[in-house]
Image: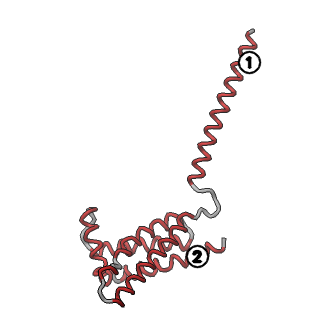
Amino acid sequence: MIVRRIARPLLAGIFVWGGYNALRHPAAHAPAAEPVTKPVAQTTGLPDDTELLVRANAAAMVGGGLLLATGKFPRLASMVLMGTLAPTAATHNFWDESDPQAKAGKLTQFIKDLSLFGGLMLAAADTEGRPGLAYRARMAGDNVERAAHNARQEAKIAALQARNSVS
């Protein structure tokens, strides 16, 4: 559908650009990311190198953004991009800001990230008109039940026919 061909690249653009920018200049993003990366590194066993984690997040943003923009694995790409938004949104700690103007700017960025997350949720759920996995699994289960029922019925008929031919 034409809407998907237009909407996916538009949604992906911010991730490709932001990821590319963070890959080129990780040191510029490190101070804002450090309050998030330090606790994450301590609890997960990831390296305690903020710039490396900024680069890893940026690479996921670029890769997921390009996949989404081109329509290749769009559901997977959307889920990857949702994963990149969590640490990004956490860096907009508007609740700690005392300056009203800075607080408003960080709040706007936080809400933008939530809005992007919503768009990615829609993209991740989009099956392009094809049945989703849950529906296909349910149909496969129904087909197995139907086949088992038919096999039992055929076995009963065969048993009755065998009994009638013996008599």
The count of marks equals 2
| Residue toward you, 47 or 160 | 160
Mark number, residue 109: none
Mark 2: give few (<14), some (14-19) or many (20+) Cα within 10 Å. some
Q: Amino acid at mark 2?
A: Ala
Q: Is residue 109 left or right of residue 42?
A: right
Relative to 129, say whether 32 is above or below.
below
| Residue toward you, 40 or 109 | 109
- Quadrant location, the N terminus: bottom right
Write the residue at 45% across / 70% down.
81
Residue 11: image location, x then y, percent: 53, 76
Q: Tell me the CA gap for discs 1 and 2.
A: 62 Å
Q: Earlier in the sequence, mark 1 or mark 2?
A: 2
Instruction: Report which residue position mark 2 lands on.
Output: 7
Write the residue at 65% across / 62% down.
129
Write the residue at 65% across / 30% down.
151
Q: Amino acid at mark 1?
A: Gln
Q: Is residue 47 left or right of residue 82?
A: left
Relative to 128, say whether 114 is above or below.
below
Residue 80: image location, x then y, percent: 45, 67
Residue 85: image location, x then y, percent: 41, 72
Q: Is the residue under label 2 in contact with that under label 1 (CB below 8 Å)?
A: no
- Quadrant location, the C terminus: top right
Mark number, residue 161: 1
Residue 53 lies in quadrant? bottom left
Q: Circle 2 sits in a helix, a strand or a loop, which is it?
A: helix
